[in-house]
Amino acid sequence: MSSLYPHAVPGVYARWQALRILLRERFLLEALRPLREDAGDVFFLPLPGMQVAVVAGAEAARMALVTLRPLLSSRLQSDPVVQLLRSGMLVIDGEAHDRMRRIAEPFFRPEYLEAHAGRMLQQIDRRIDAWPDGGVVEMDVEMRRLALEILLDVLFKLPEEAAEELWEPLQAARAYIAPGAWLLCPRIPRPSYRKPLQRLDTLIREFIRQRRSEPDQGDLFSAWVQRTDMNDEEIRDQMTTMLIAGHDTVATWLAWTIALLAWHPEIQTRVREEIREQLGENMPDPRFIHRLPLLRAVGMESLRLFPPIPVLNRRALVPLRMCGVSIPSGTRLLISIYTIHRHPKLWKAPESFQPERFLNPEGEGMGFRYLPFGGGPRFCIGAPLARLEGFLALARMLQRVIFTPLASPPRPHLRATLDPWPGVWVRVQRIAVRGSTA
């Protein structure tokens, strides 16, 4: 156990177990389990040429995200995400981060977001209308397209065709920042990404140029453009950040939730009955989401099992101590949300899909054992948008469609987000609902 390893270094047998899991599952985060069991909630990960410590417990996460936040940097200069986002809110610290957050916050308040609920539902219905009754649909891609369309409308007021223009460059950007060989060899050449990333830049700069010639649209994009203290480069960086982080995470959450419901048909039926009882055939409305506790619990449990951002990266700026473990300056900290969400001392039956665990009075107050949107001062600014569009989409889809699984359930695959691999392939069967556009 960890008491045998006072320096938080996993033993040989634990490493062997981790290697076996990695070879079998091909999923690094699952391989962290025996290392945590052996060396504790803060342990060092033996990797060549790197000093890496893993944060795998609730108290350690609280320290990393709150107590020790001033001593840690979110900006790891050699990472592709920093090279892509540059000065984007996700990868800057201190006053620069807080300033960008203050500018964006009004556009994530309930009054702003709920005013767009009707348009979100129109886009959700259009997506459902395109699914063939009785046909097979890959929901991971469908949810990505839906989330991108909603994001472009709510935050940027861009026309529908912008989603199609951005689609391929954004997929390349996702692949560019996904974990890979660059972790061990940061300077490895990656020429195949040059053209699609240049295309993404060109599109964003053209959107900025056009918006500068237009009146204020009352959206986040206009707020950036109207500011005299933000130049085109800063706007480009914030927009790139929002485009990637703002649609990818909610899309992954929706895809995993549909997968869980498809492969647990009894729970899917119960949620559909709850929706029918509370909403009938009326369109979902933000005011009524709280009347769907089982739907909310399913969404929260999906986020626990498969958090879209399963790891947060930090770097120690100075030597520090965390839960009794000395962390040298320069150490890369991996805050493994995936591991915390499956910690057996924090959760009963942590590997099981049990939405009922979020129906108790503590369901919303899970503290630092539940971090699907991070925690502390850098809590995900986009969480209110993700929750609103996510629950509206789930409620509307379950009103109109029955999901039946095909083949085996997907497995987690670590890319820019925790993707379901090889996709969420389901058969869709329509339900006749008044008020739909089908």
Image (cartoon, rainbow, N blue to C red):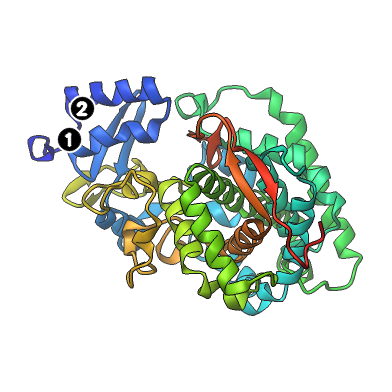
Which numbered circle lies on residue 14? 2
Where's the C terminus, which quadrant? bottom right
Q: Position of residue 47 (x, y in %)?
A: 34, 26
Q: Position of residue 273 (x, y in %)?
A: 54, 63
How would you rate the neighbour count of disc 2 (Cα within 10 Å): few for under 14, some for 14-19, many for 20 or more? many
User: What amino acid type is highlighted by mark number 2?
Assistant: Ala
| Residue 209 seen in the current view | yes
The residue where tag 1 is placed is: 38
Return the residue found at the far right: 213
| Residue 311 seen in the current view | no
Task: Determine whether 342 is above or below 112 in the image.
Answer: above
Most foreground residue, 227 or 113: 113
User: What amino acid type is highlighted by mark number 1?
Assistant: Asp
Query: Residue visible at 86% across and 62% down?
Result: 211
Where's the N terminus, which quadrant? top left
Task: Determine whether 434 is above or below 43 in the image.
Answer: below
Left or right of 291, for residue 1: left
Secondary structure of the residue carrying numbered label 1: helix
Q: Quadrant of residue 392?
A: bottom right
Secondary structure of the residue carrying numbered label 2: helix
Q: Position of residue 10 (x, y in %)?
A: 20, 31
Pointer 1 with pointer 2, Cβ within 8 A: yes
